[in-house]
Image (cartoon, rainbow, N blue to C red):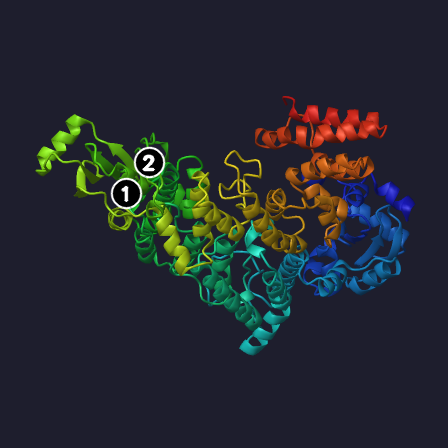
């Protein structure tokens, strides 16, 4: 057999220019370690697609025994060697081309699985389920189980479609009629039983994956869920998704945030048979938040499927961007971007209603609000090729975009002003330091002593006498005044009525909704900007403990981006105690998500405050991994590698350090060549001091100079011009 395969090394696998150079030998080299392959004839692939062979499907989807279709010349030689005629057959080979088993016919799954077991191979799905039985808290294994369940269900739908038992092939989309049945069974109960057979494992995997702590606070779900045609017909899917959607809506209503959560909810609602038509109730923070793109898209998908174009326009008009908000620079950018998307979204229903001129105006408005780059692609997705090809729309895209309007000027903050030199100046200074006015930051409340000329002008305008007085000014208009120093509570009450502080707004939200992560993170950001202030520091520590994970992108301004050596000198006792409260929860999260970067970054940040300075290497050794260890090391963020480097260098454990850094380097450099694209360069530039230099130094210490030079050369070539 190996001789026959060597002869096939020069024979193309499949006809056609795209695979003209592809050979059996090349395909076998691409197999996963320990995997085998099943050689079949290209002409038999259509019949195999209509065959419900459970073992074969699973082995193929787990990449443990993928099929390699052979072109006519390749197949003819092998069939002749086996003494077979012209009927279908299959040959199981290992990665070196050694034959393990062979047979005639199409249904090979059971025999291939038995041959692999004899070889000592454990089917990955069995290994994964055994692992999850022992470690049900491991989110990474659950999400692999969910992904494989989706792929298996999709494969089953393709088989049913090929058999004529399903009207569609299980396409992944939100855009299909909610009540349409994908199964061709005449008996509704039989259709439901078949749907449960196809999608039952998806339902079980959804339950398991969503039961893991912190599933929506990791990067594992950034791609969002898959919604497949036919899944709605499964009672099991409907029941599980309805329950999960209700749980998510409750979390969102309490202020939970996160891209995965907002992307999953519309999909779960579709699968539960209750697609979103309006946004779920959420507590929105003034100037800091906009409606979630994922939730808005979910509602728009529902209205588009129902062809409710007028309803879609009304929904977009009612999204409620507040014109009177005090826009910060961040808030203004968010508002402009979202306004641009709203106008682009309006183009779809306007085109469908034949209101082309208004659609053109909407496109121009989208560009006016800054949604210009990539608008072609956005509109192509929204409108479809036919509508996008309308000459009116095309002309609108060619017109120069008008400049976006500037951010409206922020209203000046209130000012507490002194007119004259009062005998109660000491009381005035005490007022300024009063805890009652603490919620107002220096940017939200000014203090001034009016010069003689403005003071006299204000006295004349208000009819005040010459005695010293105070005044609370909004702009140039006094809203309160007096000749005696006011009580702190009086001033705070007036300010709360006239111009409440952002801190007070967030305090109120958190009092009503203690789990509101957005409010917690926003308050954390405000408090950090006001350090040092020993009166606010305990509140800062409380928020840091409650919102201890940075944002999903890793660049959130709400993370713990300071340490014990911060210039404002954090209180050691307060932060050491906080670290002791937070770290056990983070370590529990890392046991569920050992590859997720955000829990690692948060753990490293808090560990700096812990009185015992816990060991990152010791923590890593306690984690139970589903991913192979070397691959796991290669997925860790640079922050972790730097901490590992510091610790292992201190212990002079250079072999272990070479293993860590070597795994990280192999994972990052495996596919790199000369001249990285611009979008990859910043990451690779950061790798220099964090990974490449310490790895090269460690290799030299171990006497591996040539290996060190090879690493440095690959790194230089990657950053060189193309």
When the figure is inspected, residue 308 is found, relative to residue 415, above or below; the finding is: below
Work out how far the residue at label 1 is from the one at label 2, CA to CA, in angstroms.
16 Å
Label 2 element class: helix
When the figure is inspected, residue 89 is found, relative to residue 197, above or below; the finding is: above
Q: Position of residue 612 (x, y in %)?
A: 68, 46
Q: Earlier in the sequence, mark 1 or mark 2?
A: 1
Q: In which quadrant of the rendered view does residue 658 lie?
A: top right
Q: Answer with left or right where residue 589 lies relative to residue 402.
A: right
Residue appearing at x 81%, y 35% in the figure: 654
The residue singled out by tag 1 in the image is: 357
Q: Answer with left or right where residue 520 lies relative to residue 445.
A: right
Is residue 270 among what the camera can see?
no
Q: Answer with left or right where residue 24 lies relative to residue 598.
A: right
The residue singled out by tag 2 in the image is: 368
Residue 503: give its label: none
Nearest to the observer: residue 409 or residue 28: 409
Quarter placement of the C terminus:
top right
Q: In which quadrant of the rendered view does residue 713 lie?
A: top right
Pointers 1 and 2 in contact (CB under 8 A)?
Answer: no
Label 1 element class: helix
Residue appearing at x 82%, y 42% in the figure: 25
Crowding around mark 1 (Cα neighbors within 10 Å: few <14, some 14 to 19, many 20+) is some
Q: Position of residue 159 (x, y in %)?
A: 65, 62
Nearest to the observer: residue 58 or residue 625: 625
Q: Position of residue 639 (x, y in %)?
A: 64, 38
Crowding around mark 2 (Cα neighbors within 10 Å: few <14, some 14 to 19, many 20+) is many
């Amino acid at each position: 057999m190996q001789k026959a395969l060597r002869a096939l090394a020069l024979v193309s696998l499949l006809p056609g220019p795209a695979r003209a150079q592809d050979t059996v030998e090349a395909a076998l080299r691409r197999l996963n370690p320990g995997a085998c392959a099943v050689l079949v004839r290209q002409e038999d692939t259509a019949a195999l697609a209509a065959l419900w062979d459970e073992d074969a499907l699973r082995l193929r989807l787990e990449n443990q025994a993928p099929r390699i279709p052979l072109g006519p010349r390749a197949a003819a030689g092998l069939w002749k060697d086996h003494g077979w005629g012209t009927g279908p057959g299959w040959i199981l080979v290992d990665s070196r081309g050694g034959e393990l088993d062979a047979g005639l016919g199409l249904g090979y799954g059971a025999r291939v699985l038995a041959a692999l077991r004899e070889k000592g191979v454990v089917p990955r799905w069995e290994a994964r389920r055994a692992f999850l039985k022992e470690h049900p808290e491991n989110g990474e294994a659950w999400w692999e189980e969910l992904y494989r369940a989706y792929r298996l269900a999709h494969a089953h739908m393709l088989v049913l479609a090929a058999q004529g038992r399903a009207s569609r092939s299980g396409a992944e989309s939100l855009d299909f009629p909610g009540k349409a049945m994908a199964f061709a069974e005449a008996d509704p109960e039989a259709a439901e039983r078949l749907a449960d057979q196809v999608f039952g494992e998806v339902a079980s995997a959804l339950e398991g994956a969503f039961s893991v702590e912190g599933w929506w606070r990791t990067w594992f779900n950034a791609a969002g869920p898959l919604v497949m045609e036919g899944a709605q017909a499964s009672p099991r899917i409907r029941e599980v998704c309805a329950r999960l959607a209700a749980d998510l809506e409750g979390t969102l209503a309490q202020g939970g945030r996160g891209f995965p959560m907002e992307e999953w909810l519309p999909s779960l609602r579709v699968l539960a048979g209750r697609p979103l038509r309006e946004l779920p109730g959420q507590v929105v923070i003034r100037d800091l938040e906009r409606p979630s793109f994922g939730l808005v898209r979910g509602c728009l998908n529902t209205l588009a499927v129902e062809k409710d174009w007028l309803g879609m326009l009304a929904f977009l008009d009612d999204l409620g961007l507040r014109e009177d908000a005090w826009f910060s620079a961040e808030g203004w950018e968010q508002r402009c971007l979202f306004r641009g998307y709203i106008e682009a979204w309006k183009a779809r229903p306007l085109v469908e209603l034949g209101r082309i001129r208004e659609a053109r105006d909407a496109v121009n408005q989208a560009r006016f609000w800054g949604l210009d780059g990539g608008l072609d692609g956005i509109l192509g997705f929204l409108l479809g090729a036919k509508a996008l090809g309308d000459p009116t729309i095309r002309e609108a895209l060619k017109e120069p975009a008008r400049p976006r309007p500037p951010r409206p000027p922020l209203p000046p903050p209130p000012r507490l002003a002194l007119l004259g030199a009062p005998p109660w100046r000491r009381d005035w200074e005490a007022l300024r330091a009063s805890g009652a006015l603490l919620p107002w930051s220096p940017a939200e409340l000014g203090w001034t002593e009016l010069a003689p000329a403005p003071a006299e002008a204000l006295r004349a305008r208000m009819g005040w006498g010459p005695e010293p007085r105070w005044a609370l000014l909004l702009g140039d208009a006094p809203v309160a005044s007096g000749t005696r120093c006011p009580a702190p509570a009086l001033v705070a009450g007036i300010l709360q009525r006239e111009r409440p502080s952002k801190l007070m707004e967030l305090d109120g939200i958190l009092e009503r909704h203690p789990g509101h992560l957005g409010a917690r993170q926003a308050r954390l950001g405000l408090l950090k900007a006001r350090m040092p202030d020993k009166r606010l520091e305990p509140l800062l520590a409380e928020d840091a403990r409650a919102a201890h994970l940075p944002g999903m992108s890793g660049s959130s301004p709400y993370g713990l981006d300071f340490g014990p050596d911060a210039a404002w000198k954090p209180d050691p006792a307060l932060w050491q105690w906080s670290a002791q409260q937070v770290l056990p929860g983070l370590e529990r999260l890392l046991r569920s998500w050992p590859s997720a970067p955000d829990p690692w970054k948060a753990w490293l940040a808090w560990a700096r405050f812990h009185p015992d300075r816990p060991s990152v290497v010791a923590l890593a050794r306690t984690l139970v991994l589903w991913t192979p260890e070397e691959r796991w090391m290669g997925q860790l963020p640079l922050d972790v590698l730097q901490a590992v480097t510091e610790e292992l260098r201190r212990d002079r454990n250079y072999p272990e350090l070479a293993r860590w850094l070597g795994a990280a380097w192999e994972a990052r450099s495996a596919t790199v060549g000369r001249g990285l694209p611009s979008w990859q360069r910043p990451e690779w530039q950061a790798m220099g001091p964090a990974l490449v230099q310490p790895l090269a130094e460690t290799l030299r210490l171990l006497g591996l100079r040539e290996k060190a030079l090879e690493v440095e050369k690959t790194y230089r070539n990657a950053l060189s011009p193309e």
